[in-house]
Amino acid sequence: MAIQNEKEFKATLAALPLNRQRQIAAAFGQRVMDLCHDVRVKNALASAARADITPEELALVAHSAHSARVASYAQCGHDSTWECAAGHFVARAAECCVRAATEGEPVAWEAAMQARLARTCQMVAQGEGTDNDESASQRQILETFLQN
């Protein structure tokens, strides 16, 4: 199944059950993890990728991911660099992966958008502009995920 555009990408993500959304969202976050050095974020992404995570573990890691996101936001306000902003968006992606299910956008879609923002910040920091292939990479990750 080749996902051709954003509409198909979003619809495919939305059709996945929540546990599978968490797993693919974690893959999107792990792809940009090099932009964030917070162990809480790394742990949240690793936990979200697990098919056997318990609700209790999920609640604990969600609290930790929220703390990491808040800390990254505060740090960005202090440093205000593109690299710092990239790390903050990775933390936001991780938080999306492990937060409680709510009405609104699918968690995988939100995590994908945060990962794209992280990559854009990295590109701007490197002076490369805002063109990047993160969306194409995410479509490929999703296609591979669905095949397994």
Image (cartoon, rainbow, N blue to C red):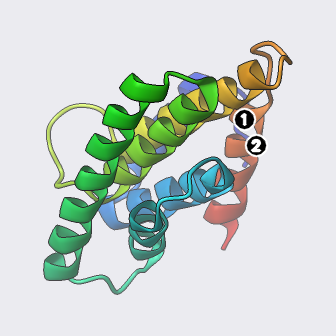
Whole-percent x, y for residue 4 in the image: 73, 30
Residue at image coords 72%, 61%: 144
Identified by mark 2, the residue type is Ser
* Three-letter code for the amino acid on which mark 1 is drawn: Glu
Residue 94, position as x, y percentages in the image = 41, 53
Q: Answer whether labels 1 and 2 touch (C-beta < 8 Å).
A: yes
Residue 128 occupies which quadrant of the picture? top right
Which residue is drawn at the image coordinates 72% and 35% (left, top)? 134
- Quarter of the image for residue 65 reads bottom left
Q: Secondary structure at mark 2?
A: helix
Q: Residues within 10 Å of mark 1 (few under 14, many from 20)?
A: many
Residue furthest to the right in view is 128
User: Between residues 15 and 123, which one lies in front from this camera angle?
Assistant: 123
Q: Is residue 14 visible?
A: no
Q: Is residue 6 above or below residue 52?
A: above
Task: Pick whichever, 68 or 99, lies toward us.
Answer: 68
Residues 134 and 145: in front is 134
Disc 2 crowd, CA 10 A, few/some/many (<14, 14-19, 20+): few
Residue identifier under label 2:
137
At horizontal 70% and vertical 38% (from top left) the residue drawn is: 3
**Where residue 40 appears, x then y in whole percent?**
39, 66
Q: Is residue 23 above or below residue 28?
A: below
Q: Quadrant of the C terminus?
A: bottom right
The disc placed on residue 134 is 1
